Image (cartoon, rainbow, N blue to C red):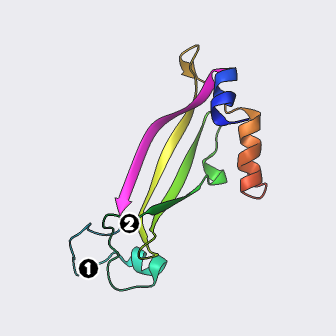
Amino acid sequence: MGAEDFIGARKIGPILKSASLKYRFPGNFDFPFLLSHLNTITHTHSPPKVKYPDTLTLATRVPPTTVSKDRFSQHFIAISHASGKVVAEGECVVVTFDYQNQKKADIPEEILRVFEREDGGRV
C-alpha cells in the first residue's frame, strides 16, 4: 500500500509543523571558513559547492527519541553527487493530522511499526 492509499483510506496523514535547514556551504561563493561540524562530517578543509546541474541525495532518519503520540522529527542531510560531500542538513517536525475532522491524530500503528523496523526496534 502506498502513502496515498494509506492516507486516502484513513483520512489521516502527515502535516508539516516546522522545518529548519542549515546550508554547509555558501553556494557559488568561496568563503575561506567552514564550520567545524562540516569538517568532521566531510573530512575536508575546502567548502563543497553545489552548482547546476549537480544532483543532491537526501538521507533521512526519524530518531526514536522524537516519536511521540501524535508527532515525530525527521532529520536529514543533503549530499552533492559532484563533490560527494554533505552540503546541507536539517530537521522537520511532522504532526499526524485527521483531515476529515480537522484535528491532530495519533500516529497510526502501521507507521509506528515502520519507524521501529527502520531503526532496529528502538521506537
Q: Nearer the viewer, residue 62 or 69?
A: 62
**Chain-order first, disc 2 or disc 1:** 1
Q: Please say whether residue 69 is visible from this viewpoint.
A: no
Q: Is residue 110 left or right of residue 93?
A: right
Q: Nearer the viewer, residue 85 or 39?
A: 85
Is 94 on the left or on the right of 46, as rendered? right
What's the residue at 20%, 71% (across, down)?
A: 29
Tag shown at residue 99: none
Q: Quadrant of residue 103?
A: top right
Q: Which numbered disc covers residue 54?
A: 2
Q: Nearer the viewer, residue 39 or 86?
A: 86
How far apart marks 2 and 1 lie (CA) works out to 22 Å
Q: Quadrant of the N terminus?
A: top right
Question: Does dot 1 land on a helix, a strand or a loop?
Answer: loop
Local SS, label 2: loop
Question: x%, y% of residue 76?
Answer: 51, 57
Which residues lie in the magenta part?
A: 10-23
Position of residue 45 measured from the top left corner of the image (x, y, whole percent): 35, 86
Whether residue 92 sits left or right of residue 7 in the image: it is left
Tell me the kind of residue under disc 1.
Phe
Give the residue displayed 32% in from the left and 72% down from the top. 49
Hey, which quadrant is residue 111 in on the image?
top right
Principal secondary structure, stretch drawn in magenta: strand
Q: Amino acid at mark 2?
A: Asp
Point out the residue furthest to the top here: 101
Camera-nearest label, 2 or 1:
2
Residue 17 within the segment the image draws in magenta: yes
Residue name at image x 31 percent, y 64 percent: 52
Looking at the image, which residue sits at the far front?
53
Where 25 sits versus 12, above or below?
below
Query: Which disc, if any, is residue 33?
Result: 1
